[in-house]
Amino acid sequence: MFEELSWIKDFITLRDILDIFLVSLVFYLILRLIVRYRGIKILLGLLGLFFLWLVALVFKLSALGWLLSQFWSISLFAVIVIFQPEIRRALQSFSTSGGILSQRYSKAKVVKKIIKAVSYMSEKQIGALVVFERNIPVHNFCEGCVKIDGLVSPELLITIFYPLTPLHDGAVVIKGNKILYAACVLPLAKDIPFDSKLGTRHRAALGITQETDAVAVVVSEETGAISVAVGGKLYRDLSENELKEILYKELGINEDS
């Protein structure tokens, strides 16, 4: 059996396999970047133009074929220009000087600080919406974000959400041990049954977890009840221990982390 397949080695060498692997890797990284930064519509548009180009070649539509062939010559430059901010952020994420490798902090301690702030706001019925960013950047789906870039502390979170302060009416985005943004307007949830008890904060928490892999914590201004949204699902009326259990599970935290 193997002798019958021996002819393959005359056509495919290790160099060819390496070449194919590297090309596949480049395409995978490009597609991952496009999907991660909401570029899927642009990708579908490019695929549609590519299909039209094939149709023009098959049916010998010279005018359409010429027009599309000119488009391909500038498409790479256009993609680089469109995704320039995203490409820069992706390259920065590989840097060890400002990236994850250089961060030295306890995830458990950070989450405990947030739980402390949430518990206080729940007791005082201070409305709040705290979003934990994971792999997909949350601010790409938001509007009106104010950059904070400050270390997480209960005092800072409570101050942000305290009524009548400039930043209280919106969401806070947390990444690692930093409060990245405040006053973020999140997309509201889609395709959920009407619930008169489900306020704007809860719908926003569901909305951002439908669009991204984030975890959102909500404190109701009316009742002080604590809820968590994950993957488009809402877990309501949680105790402090239940909140800790869900956050530790979803964020991959143990007491030693």
Image (spheres, rainbow, N blue to C red):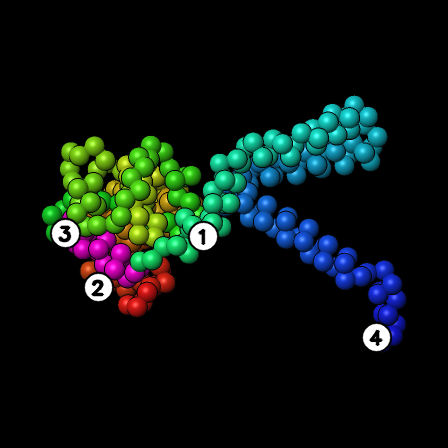
Q: Where is mark 2, residue-wise? A: 241
For the point 49% across and 36% down, the residue is 85
Q: Is residue 198 magenta?
A: no
Task: Kindly report the distance in space between the C-alpha atoms of the residues bearing marks 2 and 1.
Answer: 35 Å
Q: Amino acid at mark 3?
A: Tyr
Q: Earlier in the sequence, mark 3 or mark 4?
A: 4
Of badges 4 and 1, the one in the foreground is: 1
Image position of 35 (left or right of 234) = right
Q: Which quadrant of the rendered structure holds the C terminus?
A: bottom left
Q: Answer yes or no: do the residues labelled 2 and 3 have beta carbons within 8 Å?
A: no
Q: Answer yes or no: do the residues labelled 4 and 1 have beta carbons within 8 Å?
A: no
Q: Earlier in the sequence, mark 2 or mark 4?
A: 4
Q: Which mark is residue 120?
A: 3
Q: Amino acid at mark 4?
A: Phe
Q: Earlier in the sequence, mark 3 or mark 1?
A: 1
Of badges 2 and 1, the one in the foreground is: 1
Q: Residues within 10 Å of mark 2 (few under 14, many from 20)?
A: few
